[in-house]
Image (cartoon, helix red, strand yellow):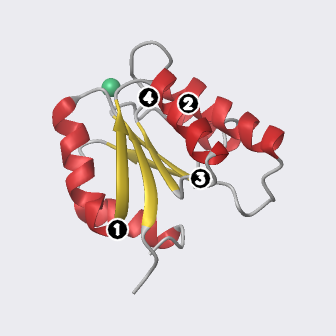
Amino acid sequence: MSKMLHILIAEDDVLSQELIRGYLQSYGECVTVDDGESAIREFENAFKSGKPFDLVCMDIMMPNIDGIEAVTTMRDMEKDFGVDPGNEVQIIMITAIGDSKTIMDSFYKHGVNSYIVKPLIKEKLDDEIKRLGLI
Ligand SMILES: [Mg+2]
């Protein structure tokens, strides 16, 4: 039995949010938010309360702060908090945006660990979570 994961789902589309939560709820505790600003706040609160997230599923197109800016902020916060290399949260982008520049920048400039272009299916999500060593 793998450990229960602490999972943050940032997705502004209600149906997509419910889909992702449905796919992931058996793996642990899911927190859902619908914009990047709330995602950053939850991320910071979880860290400061000693229960950081293991996995973040991040949409890109969201109101207030988008997913790219949110993950960039999270990686900066981890540096500020002194998170050891290798202990950073695993971030999966789950988005309708599928152009190669956005995908490459997400990996190499913004520090995401995985990138899934919608439509999302459970098998793909499970494959990525396994590849990241979370299950
Ligand atoms: Mg969106």
Distance from the alpha carbon under mark 2 to that under mark 1: 22 Å
Distance from the alpha carbon under mark 4 to that under mark 3: 21 Å
Label number found at residue 40: 2
Label number found at residue 27: 1
Disc with the residue nearer the chain's start (1 vs 4): 1
- Name the kind of residue labelled 2 in the image: Ile
Disc with the residue nearer the chain's start (3 vs 2): 2
Q: Residue at x 59, y 53 (%)?
A: 52
Which quarter shows the C terminus? Answer: bottom left
Give residue 51's position: percent from left, percent from top.
57, 55
Q: Is residue 6 above or below residue 19?
A: below
Disc with the residue nearer the chain's start (1 vs 3): 1
Q: Nearer the viewer, residue 100 or 25?
A: 25
Residue that label 4 marks: 60
Q: Is mark 1 within 8 Å of ligand 1?
A: no
Q: Secondary structure at mark 4?
A: loop
Q: Is residue 93 left or right of residue 80?
A: left
Q: Nearer the viewer, residue 25 or 92?
A: 25
At label 4, counting other C-alpha atoms closer than 10 Å, the crowd grade (few under 14, some 14-19, many 20 or more) is many
Distance from the alpha carbon under mark 3 to that under mark 2: 12 Å
Distance from the alpha carbon under mark 1 to that under mark 4: 23 Å
Give residue 5's position: percent from left, percent from top.
45, 65
Q: Is mark 3 within 8 Å of ligand 1?
A: no
Disc with the residue nearer the chain's start (4 vs 3): 3
Disc with the residue nearer the chain's start (2 vs 1): 1
Q: Residue at x 70, y 39 (%)?
A: 75
- Name the kind of residue labelled 1 in the image: Tyr
Q: Residue at x 25, y 39 (%)?
A: 17
Q: Secondary structure at mark 3?
A: loop
Q: Is mark 4 within 8 Å of ligand 1?
A: yes
